[in-house]
Structure formats: structure tokens, C-alpha cells
Amino acid sequence: MRFIKRDRPNWALLRAETDRIGAEVEQWPYEQLDRDAEDQPCIECQLGTVRVEFQIDRYDRLPNQDLCICIDARSDLPT
């Protein structure tokens, strides 16, 4: 259980940055979001001394044309 307490601040930091990226992505045009993950640019940022990469993935398009989006975060922060 100690690792949970130790890593909680890192998880919170990544979560806050993911929320910020999500708010930014919500403003993108529909056409920009309606692409496979392989066609989306990777978003990179620095959190302190650690580089974090975010990958946007449109994993589904609903019958009403709404898009289902996933944001994957990758970093060397232990979580």
C-alpha cells in the first residue's frame, strides 16, 4: 500500500495535465478529431523534469456521428 501513497501525487499531476489536454482537444474541429490515432500528432509537454506524451485516439464513431475519444498519457513517472 505504500506505493499508492508514494505515487498518488504523480497520478494527480498526470490527471490534471490530461484534463488540461482534454479541454484543449475539445476545441479542435470535428475533422481533426475524426482520425485514427496513427494519424493524430502526439502532444508532448514537460512536467517538471519529466517529458509526458499524450496520444489522442478516436476509437469509435456513433450512428449520430458523435466521436468517442481516448487520451493516453505516457511518461516515466511512477504511478
Image (spheres, rainbow, N blue to C red):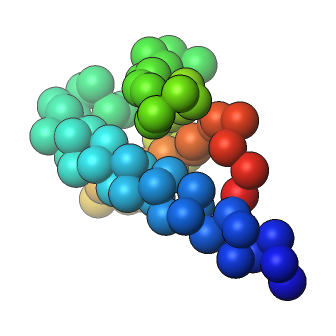
In the image, 31: left or right of 6?
left
Residue 23 rendering spot, x and y as whole percentages? 22, 50
Which quarter shows the C terminus?
A: bottom right
Residue 70's spot in the image, x, y percent? 50, 49
Which residue occupies 85% across, 83% down? 1
Toward the viewer: 67 or 6?
Answer: 6
Residue sitting nearer the eye, 64 or 69: 69
Q: Is residue 44 left or right of residue 51?
A: left
Question: In which image quadrant can residue 63 be found?
Answer: bottom left
Picture residue at 38% right of the left edge, 48% below the top:
17
Q: Is residue 37 visible?
A: no
Residue 49, visible in the rendered structure = yes
Where residue 68 appears, as percent x and y from the top left, is 43, 54
Against 15, residue 37 (above or below) is: above
Measuring 58% from the left and 19% from the top, which residue is drawn there?
38
| Residue 43 pos. (x, y %) | 42, 24
